Image (spheres, rainbow, N blue to C red):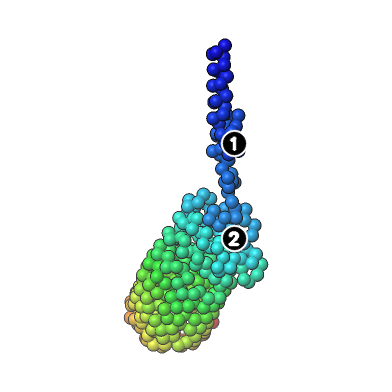
């Protein structure tokens, strides 16, 4: 009997020792586990309204954000590439969403495609997003309505190699707008509305090899505009509004340029030593201009020129000095001009090469 009473007292004491936030409990150890998990103010679901939790690769739940990114890896800081769409009215320049690109700081390839319903969907370079991506190597923005690119718009991305900005209605490139990117190799600015190239637009781009500015409205290029592009090998200025005369100093600094495309402009004559700064040039394309005359020293200094294309112009005659000192020339296209005569003096410098099967000399039609 005494033992039975002792057991009852022991059970009462054990039960009384269990205590939760609401007082003593008779539910034993299970209440202890509940106390640990049911902490005040903690949700089992993430708070989608907390900006600190935003992952730009998981924006599909945020119906108020006019941006969506498709990433190769959706987890935070795991994506290496992202294709982003800006739609409806887009996001303002000071929208906090641009800063949330820090959630994917390892992205190396990024594109912005504009699918907006107004011309205001994207009117600026999203610099606030770019500064969060220090390892970015490839950037493309397309179909935006960016009237001007401001200075240091690309946040001095030290690892960027390929910058593509075609079809964005760009009109102005401000001072040092494309600058201080030591690894940049290719810049594409084609199919915009750029009307001039001033000095200091391109600065501190020691690795740039290719610059495409075709299909714009460029009518003026400042002397020395490309002076800092010492390693540039290809320059495309085709389908613009360039006119004569072009100063030789427009091409100052382009010591390594190998290909220059100026097709489909409004050039009507080639002045003396117009390309004399281009000592490494191998291909010069001047098709589909309105060239009537070429000074006898027009191609002077092009000691490495191999291909010269002058098709679809308005040439009626060529100076006897036109092809002199162009010792490496092996391709000439003069088709569809208004040539009335071609003198022996004109072809004499290339006469020996005309017998070589690897030499091409096209002359046909008017």
Which mark lies nearer to you, 2 or 1? 1
Left-right relation of 333 to 59: left
Seen at 55% across and 61% down, the residue is 97
User: Residue 338, relative to residue 22: is it above or below?
Assistant: below
Closer to the camera in the image, 49 or 179:
49
- Residue 13 seen from this side: yes
- Kind of element beneath mark 2: strand
View extreme (right): residue: 117
- Residue 364 seen from this side: no
Q: Position of residue 103 (x, y in %)?
A: 50, 55
Seen at 43% across and 59% down, the residue is 135
Seen at 42% across and 81% down, the residue is 199
Specify which label sits upstream in the sequence, 2 or 1. Answer: 1
Identify the image quadrant of the C terminus.
bottom right
Residue at image mark 1: 23
Residue at image mark 2: 67
Q: Position of residue 193 (x, y in %)?
A: 55, 77
């Amino acid at each position: 009997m005494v033992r039975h009473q002792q057991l009852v007292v022991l059970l009462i004491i054990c039960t009384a020792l269990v205590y939760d936030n609401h007082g003593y409990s008779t539910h034993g150890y299970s209440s202890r586990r509940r106390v640990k998990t049911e902490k005040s103010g903690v949700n089992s679901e993430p708070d989608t309204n907390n900006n600190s939790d935003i992952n730009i690769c998981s924006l599909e739940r945020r119906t108020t954000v006019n941006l969506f990114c498709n990433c190769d890896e959706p987890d935070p800081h795991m994506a290496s590439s992202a294709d982003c769409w800006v739609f409806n009215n887009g996001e303002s320049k000071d929208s906090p969403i641009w800063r949330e690109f820090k959630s994917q700081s390892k992205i190396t390839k990024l594109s912005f495609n504009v699918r907006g319903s107004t011309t205001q969907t994207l009117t600026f370079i999203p610099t606030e997003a770019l500064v969060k991506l220090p390892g970015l190597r490839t950037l493309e923005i397309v179909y935006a309505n960016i009237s001007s690119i401001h200075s240091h718009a690309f946040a001095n991305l030290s690892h960027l190699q390929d910058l593509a900005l075609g079809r964005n209605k760009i009109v102005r490139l401000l001072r040092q707008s494309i600058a201080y990117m030591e690894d940049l190799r290719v810049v594409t600015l084609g199919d915009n509305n750029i009307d001039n190239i001033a000095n200091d637009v391109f600065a501190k781009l020691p690795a740039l090899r290719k610059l495409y500015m075709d299909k714009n409205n460029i009518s003026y290029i400042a002397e020395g505009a490309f002076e800092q592009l010492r390693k540039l090998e290809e320059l495309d200025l085709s389908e613009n509004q360039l006119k004569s005369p072009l100063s030789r100093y427009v091409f100052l600094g382009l010591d390594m340029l190998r290909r220059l495309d100026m097709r489909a402009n409004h050039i009507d004559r080639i002045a003396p030593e117009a390309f004399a700064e281009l000592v490494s040039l191998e291909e010069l394309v001047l098709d589909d201009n309105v060239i009537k005359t070429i000074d006898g020293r027009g191609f002077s200094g092009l000691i490495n020129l191999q291909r010269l294309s002058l098709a679809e112009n308005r040439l009626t005659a060529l100076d006897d000095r036109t092809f002199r000192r162009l010792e490496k020339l092996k391709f000439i296209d003069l088709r569809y001009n208004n040539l009335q005569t071609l003198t022996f003096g004109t072809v004499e410098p290339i006469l020996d090469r005309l017998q070589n099967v690897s030499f091409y000399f096209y002359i046909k039609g008017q």
